[in-house]
Amino acid sequence: MFTRHRGSEGRRPSRYGNGETQVHLRGLLTENLSLNVEKSGATAATGGSSVTYGRPAPSESAVVGGEYEGRRGLPGAAGRPPSGMTQSVVVQVGQCGNQIGCCFWDLALREHAAVNQKGIYDEAISSFFRNVDTRAVGHKVFGSLYQEQILEKLRKSAEHCDCLQCFFIIHSMGGGTGSGLGTFLLKVLEDEFPEVYRFVTSIYPSGEDDVITSPYNSILAMKELNEHADCVLPIDNQSLFDIISKIELMMNSGKLGTVIKPKSLVTSSAGTSKKRQEKPFDKMNNIVANLLLNLTSSARFEGSLNMDLNEISMNLVPFPQLHYLVSSLTPLYTLADVNIPPRRLDQMFSDAFSKDHQLIRADPKHSLYLACALMVRGNVQISDLRRNIERLKPSLQFVSWNQEGWKTSLCSVPPVGHTHSLLALANNTCVKPTFIELRERFMRLYKKKAHLHHYLQIEGMEEGCFTEAVSSLSALIQEYNQLDATKSLPVEDIPRLSVAV
Amino acid sequence: MSIVTVQLGQCGNQIGFEVFDALFSDSHCPQKFCSKRENEAYQASCKERFFSEEEDGVPVARAVLVDMEPKVINQTLSRAAHSGRWKYGQHSHLCQKQGSGNNWAYGYSVHGPRHEESIMNLIQKEVEKCDSLSGFFIVMSMAGGTGSGLGAFLTQNLQDQYSNSLKMNQIIWPYGTGEVIVQNYNSILTLSHLYRSSDALLVHENDAVHKICAKLMNIKQISFRDINQVLAHQLGSVFQPTYSGEGSFHYRRNPLGIDWQVRPPLSGLPTLGKMPLSKELHFNTSIANLVILRGKDVHSADLGAFKDPALYTSWLEPVTAFNVWKTQRAFSKYEKSAALVSNSQSLVKPLDMIVGKAWNMFASKAYLHQYTKFGIEEEDFLDGFALLEQVIASYSNL
């Protein structure tokens, strides 16, 4: 039976300062749990996977300029921990998660370097503190085996934050580690740091997945996501592929003026000037990394209408289980030719609502919006925002009790290479088909009991786990069904309280 | 007599800055239409109300800045300091690291009690700097979490601790089409709480100010800065010193000089059924109107139209309900300017809309778990709804 072992020091990290907050960003990227990874079947239970875990060499993830290493605090405030901002801890799990994570760090540092030329470790940088490389594998077995070590790492990370606000977990659903350990961690984080938000970026398996048992992994993971994540941003590889194809089409079209600013590409890595070998998933991972950057931009930089991470959950999650958000990013690139007038600002808003810019295949326009957030960066003002909301509203269907369900933010600092950008997050019933497909693929395998023995031989796993996971998913689908059923009904006004004057 | 300003949350702090800036700019604007002596008296009065003096001669705003995250306060402090003309006190602010997440319950139940002592101490320090305190001016939004929730908590505290001083809350109504999804919930909770502890609620609607920027000022790309500056301009033209008809700059305890408490006639209100809001009203019925005139020809201005009984509810005489304040000293660079502060039915429609939308959402129970998490239960919502429906009914029946 699966049990958790509480460490001898069950002390919770203090939220308001634990003395030193020394940061060695370069050093962090080489931290590692050194474990022997056994190659075994790709099951969420054992967490083995059919690929090897090569570590990215430290130099590949080298920080820009190296100025960040060792400095701490604001200039002239030697020894004092950076005051003011909240921190987030990024937890990268599994191969997918770690690759994305590394891209993320490169881009994050590039973004802060662009804003802060002198490369002083400033408050905005301190908002992203540590990444925790949890190469350990598996949910049930390795999860509990290495639980203490993982927990220790997380605690240490949290202690260095004087106000930890959020954990970002990056993982895939289909593989073993990302899926199993990634979701195991959710429960651990919830128990250990109940007040800290858990945002999960999950890569959902596409149709032709190279991992046969990915449906099992995904279903098991979904249960954990349902119960222990505050917010999930599902992403599928196919959408990322499509974005890349679209960009390549644009670049190769040979049209006049289609020279693109290299740094502006949503797919480009931080060090485009370096001649490092581009890895196959780099482009796709950079898109996801950019998603995270934009998500947190308003928390890191100033603006006329700030949006902190806790506001995302507050505004976009009307009911605890319905916390799956469809994301779309725009622009994907900026043209380099200054003689071409910049695309109209309004086009950016239209693009955000086009399927081409979504990070998951879904059809929000023909489904029901529960809530929508627009996070704008750069030289955009409130009137631009409002004009576009008015313009786009008529073509979108919002649930009857949230007809004006828009959450907006304006951050002054645009991403590198752009004058402005927009991240749209939608809580929309259009995620339902993704979940239905997941369930169907699962049933196809499960009916035949194919590969089941890999899972069942793990202590603590039994068929009950699967049936529970499937009913959890079915319940979720049912909630979306009920909402969809209200779609075409007329909006009725509920009778108000009548009072005596 | 002095006013202590409390700036809360992003909105409150951004606006607060613009207000002090507008007051200062007007105060130091070269004057053509009044004597030097009069101008000096005006400047002195403005200074006493809103600024205190520091050794280096730079006026310090009589303000306490509060926010639950640091970015906006840091910006506000540095903008003031960089202007070189006035500044905020070095130790007049409190900020935390993590905001209220647009959650009224978090602002009210968590941040409020947690920081009550610190904030009240900061306010006390400001109060002690005043020779005589006339009251508090609290600037906040309704839609977010800090201004709204913490603002409501704080106003209650001020009511308890400074019961003899006036509290006026400057409330920003959010855009109708949404800045924050739970803005209607936050608004209901804020208004219902403030109704019990504030003396006056001065309201500015983002939509209305936005229209001013677009239609009257022809600004093409309207930013929050534009909106805040228009707002500050309006507030400045209300708060700057005036003669209240007694021949001297006499700033009364009640900054608006009118008793805003509605006193229905002793015989009781005429019994009316709930008036349908779709009914065409010829006039926007008022309880009280205050006109403030500044600049050239103020003494010859004809205000007869404001004394039309049709403007007021049947159980009030215009002479009770209407007031005018004047000064020959012009506001800013405007040769003539006028401001109207009105307690009337004009806010019934917007209030009704907010209550309607909030009720709709409440019926579906959406987002309630975010509030109950921090101790605000369905009952608290219902209390809020009941109170506001009464307010709407009372105003509708004028």
Image (cartoon, rainbow, N blue to C red):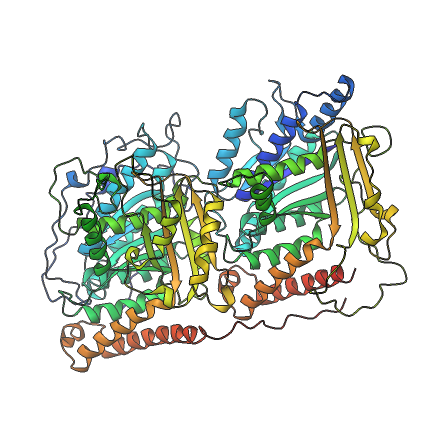
Q: Is residue A328 left or right of residue B252?
A: left
Q: Position of residue A214 (x, y in %)?
A: 18, 68
B226 and A224: which is toward the camera? B226
Q: Quadrant of residue A126?
A: top left
Q: Quadrant of residue A110?
A: top left
Q: Is residue B207 left or right of residue A443?
A: right
Q: Is residue B160 above or below residue B84?
A: below
B238 and A501: which is toward the camera? B238
Give the mark count.
Answer: 0
Q: Residue furthest bottom?
A: A447
Q: Residue furthest right?
A: B267
Q: Position of residue A244 (x, y in %)?
A: 20, 52
Tell me if I can see residue B135 in this picture: yes
Q: Position of residue A383 (x, y in %)?
A: 49, 45
Residue at 41%, 67% (x, y): give it: A368
A74 and B290: which is toward the camera? B290
Residue at 12%, 40% (x, y): give it: A276
Q: Is residue A486 above or below residue A179?
A: below
Tell me if I can see residue B132 in this picture: no
A158 and B313: which is toward the camera? B313
